[in-house]
Amino acid sequence: MDRRFVDRQPVYLQLREILRAQIESGEYPPGAKLPSENELAALYKIGRLTIRSSLSALALEGLVRSVQGKGVFVLGPKIPRDMETLGGFKQTMTAQNRRASTRILERSLRPAGPYYARLFGMDAKEGLFYVRRLLRADDEPVSLEEVFVRQAAVPKFSEFDPGVFSIYEIYDMLHVTVTEAVQRLDLAVPDVSQARLLGTQPGQAVLHFRCLSSNEAGEVLEYASTYTRSDMCSYSIHFEKRGCNGI
């Protein structure tokens, strides 16, 4: 075993920290391929199972990605997003100096149907604009999004291309104001076709956001369901303690 390892901590955690330091120092920049398990085992004189545990720990943190048959690759920095601020994907990417692009997979006008009628508080026969799209940063897939927009609240929505403009840019141009949004976050495993579009491995969990947005009149304006790669984005929420009673 390499002399850099000590007895007081599991070896796989020590190797994880060594590899992390090498990644953070730029020795292995984003996109670089790490040495193979055999190469690392020979270099550090430890077993392949230990190597695998270290790489798995780094993958769970979103620092590296294992691609079957190709190796383990270093990922770029995650895109920080603020869950407190209402805004579109394009605006967020622009603020981070990233190039946003959108691929429209489907767009249509459809009846709400029973499920979405309950969600929106509308008649099942009323119309919803539907958009399914893949959101990318610097040509890398980030999110797979389904958006339902109430036709009666934004009747001219179909005149704009959601592949060119973000949803919030369209709202701004139509003078539609979103005043409130309720968002739910879960972990989910996309199906095979969704994973292929996102560029994730089959069975790999992603972040699943579901959001209901309302306008000034208190009407539900939009419902969005978004699968986002956890290795590409990190999210923050700011909490502020008010008063001194600890409540």
Image: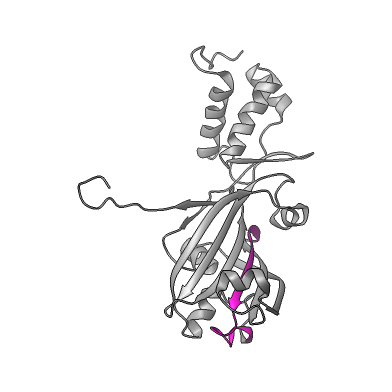
Please say if 37 is above or below 219.
Answer: above
Colour treatment of the image? one colour
Quarter where residue 70 is shown: top right
Identify which residue, 102 or 113, lies in the foreground.
Answer: 113
Q: Please name the residue shown 67% across and 68% down the image.
A: 133
The residue drawn where x is 65% and y is 58% is: 141
The residue lying at 51 percent from left, 77 percent from top is: 169
Residue 144, image x and y in percent? Answer: 65, 61
Residue 147: say if magenta.
Answer: yes
> Picture quarter containing residue 121?
bottom right
Vertically, is 205 above or below 211? above
* Number of on-image labels: 0
Counting from the top left corner in percent of width and height, residue 167 is at 55, 74
Residue 101: x percent and y percent? 62, 68
Residue at screen point 51% across, 80% down: 171
Q: Residue 137, can we see it?
A: no
Q: Which residues are magenta?
A: 139-158
Identify which residue, 58 or 154, lies in the foreground.
154
Is 81 on the left or on the right of 130, as rendered? left
The quadrant where residue 142 appears: bottom right
- Against 208, residue 34 (above or below) is above
Q: Is there any visible trace of residue 13 in the rendered image?
A: yes
Residue 90 shown in magenta: no
Quadrant, the N terminus: top right
| Nearer to the camera, 135 or 83 | 83
- Residue at far right of view: 69
Point out residue 3 in the picture as x, y percentages from the top left corner: 55, 13
